[in-house]
Amino acid sequence: MAITTGDQLVAAMAAAPLYAWYKNNPANIVAYTLSSLWLTGGSPVNGAAPGAAATCTSATTGAVPYTNPTAPALTYLGYYTLSINGTTQAAIVVLQDRLSHMGGLSGTSVAVQTVNLTVPANRLASSDLTNIEWWVEGYTDLGATPQTLTVTYVNTSSVTNTVAISIPATMRSGRLIKIVPTTSGDVIQSITSCQLGGSTGTAGSFGFTNSRRLAQAATTYATVIDIEDIVTTGLSQIADNSCLWFSTMVSAASTPPTGLLKLVQG
């Protein structure tokens, strides 16, 4: 049963606890590039680099801890804040449901490397999957030679296509590169494999992640806090078992981001 009245919303907001989150930035974070906070310490604790493709849930180490409501109640994002204390650096922190991930791919292999990553069921993916984002994610630094990564995927019409992704020189641990098909109309349903055009010079470790974006908060050079409430979050619904995950983009290496999170259930 969804929250349908103002009284229900007020009661649910009052009953929901505040979760204080903070995350360290990745080492060697690159300004104006999106970086995952999956491996960094803080609250929630750091996650682990994955191996074979796996579904992420609220029980996965690294996820924001919370308990599913008793059916038919649902969970919503009621309140989300970001603060960068003691600095005037600009920052964005994105809150997403980390749906599934895989890792352990080599930056020196020029062979076809298996991925086999799909979108898990029951996590509020739209029927056409247009609300799902796909990422190349770095787990340890790759080498200094930039390369092209050819990603082979199956679209929502069950047609296999490829897209070329530019891997930068010394792709850092935590770096996220969004995968956007260049074939008109394509939406990714699954990623089957990938292949580097040449060695980056260091094996490192990278992989793939898919996610559903819930909200983002931003600070500027003039402000150090952003508050997103029920109006600006739109009471985004959070699926049962969601793996809530943070990623960030900063103007320069900065103070670790902190904030508050309130998950409303009813």
Image (cartoon, rainbow, N blue to C red):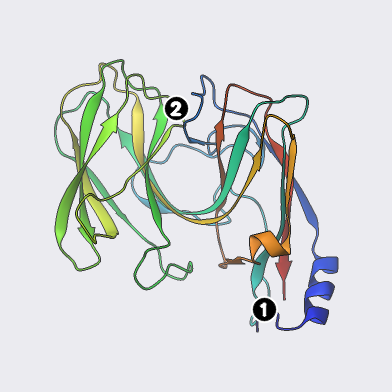
Mark 2 Cα shell of 10 Å, populated few (<14), some (14-19), many (≥20): many
Reply above or below: 173 against 156.
above
The disc placed on residue 51 is: none
Give the residue at x 64% y 82%. Answer: 72
Q: Position of residue 106 (x, y in %)?
A: 27, 29
Which secondary structure lies at badge 1? loop
Helix, strand or loop at label 2? It is loop
Q: Position of residue 71 (x, y in %)?
A: 64, 80
Find residue 173 and name its label.
2
Residue 229 appears in which quarter of the rendering? bottom right
The residue lying toward the viewer, choosing from 92 and 19, is 92
Three-letter amino acid code at the position of disc 2: Ser
Residue 62 pos. (x, y %):
58, 44
Q: In the rendered image, which residue does mark 1 sit on?
A: 73
Tell me: 193 left or right of 142.
Answer: left
Vertical order, 8 against 42 (above or below): below
